[in-house]
Image (cartoon, rainbow, N blue to C red):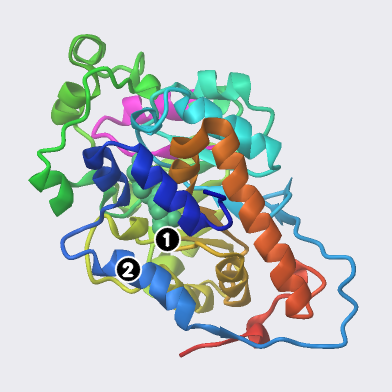
Amino acid sequence: MDVVNLADMEALARERLPRDVWDWLAGGAEDERTVAWNTEAFRRIRVRPRVLVDVRQRELAVNILGQDVALPVLVAPMSHHALIHPDAELAVARAAAAMGTIAVFGTGAHYSIEEVAAVSSGPIWFQLYCHDSRPVVERIIRRAEAAGCRALVVTVDGGHYDARRERNIRNRFRLPSSLRLGNLVGVGMDDEVLRTEGAPGFLAKARSMPPTWDDIAWIRSVTHLPLILKGIMTGEDAARAVDLGVDGLIVSNHGGRGIDCTLASIEALPEVVEAVAGRTMVLLDSGVRRGTDVLKAIALGAQAVLIGRPVLWGLAVDGEAGVRRVFEILRDEIDTALAQLGRPGVASVDRSMVVLP
Ligand SMILES: Cc1cc2nc3c(=O)[nH]c(=O)nc-3n(C[C@H](O)[C@H](O)[C@H](O)COP(=O)(O)O)c2cc1C
């Protein structure tokens, strides 16, 4: 089958992966309404094409925290790539670098951030899940800094808690004990459990801890890396984060994996953008599947978006090349959409490009 769009890639990935791994990757909380709304809400936004504009040259590049990025689409942080493909984060890092974009790897990675940095010629960011020991958190941050990560993304949504992902419950899904957690070795956690029981036993015992505002203020004080909060869904939290001096926010409902029935992230974007009022960078993830989705998010005030599941679809289908293909498809769709909408570049996309339902 020719892969023409991301839905084709999704269908191929589904054929290739074991059923329980597919369900782990695709699934969301409870009735998976938010999973569905994330994509549907993008579809309901209409676009307004302008004509007679010279769009023979189109500029897809954007600048994110001082970094030139070839297209406004980044790789979202996702745990356990090794369930999908043995090259795991290494393949994703190489693909992102080849496509000229930023990839985010984090606490749940199989390969360590040093191993990922060693194969990547592109910018990488580190995603942090907190732990109840500040010395442990600080050691993880120091490793990310030393590996050359350009920003620290702290996930602040319910990602630290178990979610009711019913597909996993029905499948009695268990992580394989061969799975590593390369970033959690040697940071003062229980290396012996990690060595003998692998990721599943370790995660069952780990004292991961959802951060509070105090923790964010503390993290801000211990690192000079730009600090980005991932999982902001309301104007109230966005305003409070700005007051703490964060460098960016990611509007995200974790791809609908944490709690069902939230707004789609694209529906939450306007209130966050309004509360932020230009004082910090706003990114968005959850449900981006088309070039027009990317431009709709930018029209509503995001500087760029991140994609989660589509990266793992590409990884499942053809490793590094599959991930590259996902980005090529989105790049071509964005380019075509800019031409069709009479916009010479991402920078010329503004609120007047969209009509909300
Ligand atoms: C399999 C999988 C694992 C994930 N693991 C993490 C994680 O470890 N940390 C995190 O902040 N977000 C994680 N996420 C959420 C993604 O970063 C992102 O918010 C979400 O996938 C975006 O939605 P999309 O998949 O619709 O593009 C994960 C998502 C998936 C699908």
Can residue 216 be seen?
Answer: no
- Residue at image position (30%, 60%) is 256
Front residue (pair 249, 320): 320
Please state the horizontal and vertical placement of residue 117, each as a whole percent of the image. 58, 24
Label 1 packing within 10 angstroms: few (<14), some (14-19), many (20+): many
Label 2 packing within 10 angstroms: few (<14), some (14-19), many (20+): some
Front residue (pair 8, 271): 8
User: Which segment did they paint magenta?
Assistant: 125-143
Q: Is residue 111 above or below residue 162?
A: above
- Per the model, the C-alpha gap separating discs 1 and 2 is 10 Å
- Residue at image position (18%, 15%) is 197
Please state the horizontal and vertical placement of residue 232, each as a whole percent of the image. 39, 62
Tell me the SS state at disc 1: loop
Q: Does any atom of ligand 1 lie closer than 8 Å to the CB of label 1?
A: yes
Which residue position is annotated with label 2? 36
Please state the horizontal and vertical placement of residue 270, each as a whole percent of the image. 49, 78
The amino acid beneath tag 1 is Ser
* Residue 136 part of the magenta-drawn span: yes
Residue 99: name its quadrant.
Answer: top right
Which residue position is annotated with label 1? 286
Q: Is residue 282 above or below residue 269?
A: above
Q: Is residue 51 left or right of residue 11?
A: right
- Residue at image position (57%, 50%) is 2
Q: Earlier in the sequence, mark 1 or mark 2?
A: 2
